[in-house]
Amino acid sequence: MSRLAGKVAIITGAASGMGLAAAELFAREGAKVVATDVVADVLEKEVAGLAGDVIAVPLDVASADAWAEVVAAAVSAYGGVDILVNNAGIHLAKGILETELDEWDRVMAINTTGVWLGMKAVIPQMKARGGGSIVNCSSIAGIMGGAADGHGAACSASKGAVRSLSKHAAQWFAADNIRVNSVHPGAVFTGMAQAIGITSRAAMAAYDNGNTPLAPHAGEPMDIAYGYLYLASDESKFVTGEELVIDGGWITH
Ligand SMILES: NC(=O)c1ccc[n+]([C@@H]2O[C@H](COP(=O)([O-])OP(=O)(O)OC[C@H]3O[C@@H](n4cnc5c(N)ncnc54)[C@H](O)[C@@H]3O)[C@@H](O)[C@H]2O)c1
């Protein structure tokens, strides 16, 4: 119950799915959690139900000004930042030919630019603390094509960029004792699946048509949160620039 004792963690997209599971788990493991999301009212309600040391701070990850406010809130409440989980993201099930430019820009702004802005905002704090751990949520769509990308051209591009940006940052900030890794979820039943009408894990497994060999053929948010926890904690102190795939075996096809 103390794998993150004494650490301060900012988590994005914490009002739902994997981000909410991470906020719950990190607080349970002794972290002081700054839970953030663009849907401030939902975030407030969800965070109120969590045990431990958690504050809710509104954040649109695509806004540099909002990032500055979140880091200021973390410093003011808890004295600094040790961990950043760039978890927030959106999906758009449109291919190259169907995607409009404004849709493309929105996906990239949240899924990729948001990750860059988050790292840019927290790294000076981490340097001042003598190190830190950044965990960026990519996807199996950042590694492979086909059904794994949910017919999302912009999503694939955005998640591939998160994968390579994580390696870039891992190299450039290793000397500052800042580790940067990416997590690559497969099919996980969350708000994102519900947004396209999938109503249960079983329905998600059916939707993905046998791509995930490991039962129950669709993950749950806590499956990913445990990956975030390992990479955020000092247990992974010799791991950086790495890709942790959590997908029930999808990419082994
Ligand atoms: N669910 C899956 O099968 C799956 C697969 C691969 C990758 N992912 C990735 O996992 C991450 C978590 O997604 P999830 O599945 O838990 O979905 P979710 O929809 O349940 O949660 C995503 C959260 O991000 C928030 N968000 C959206 N835009 C934002 C913005 N501009 N600023 C701040 N927060 C914003 C949403 O409000 C929501 O609370 C995402 O990066 C997603 O791309 C999900």
Image: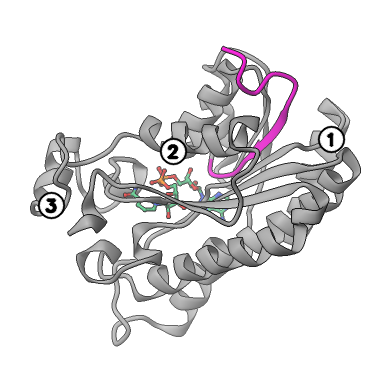
- 118 vs 236, nearest the viewer: 236
Circle 2 Cα neighbour tier, 10 Å, few/some/many (<14 / 14–19 / ≥20): many
Q: Position of residue 215 (x, y in %)?
A: 14, 35
Q: Which mark is residue 163?
A: none
Q: Does residue 228 lie above or below 67 as drawn?
A: above
Name the side, left or right, on which 145 lies relative to 240: left
On whether residue 7 falls in the magenta region, the answer is yes
Which range is magenta? 1-13
Mark 2 or mark 3, earlier in chain: 2
* Residue depicted at 22% across the width and 56% down the height: 252
Q: Nearer the viewer, residue 13 or 222?
A: 222
Residue at which label 3 appears: 207
- Residue tagged 1: 80
Q: Are marks 1 and 2 in contact (CB under 8 Å)?
A: no
In this view of the protein, can residue 42 be seen by the observer? no
Tell me the CA gap for discs 2 and 3. 20 Å
Label 1 CB sits under 8 Å from any ligand 1 atom: no
**Nearest to N terminus: mark 1 or mark 3:** 1
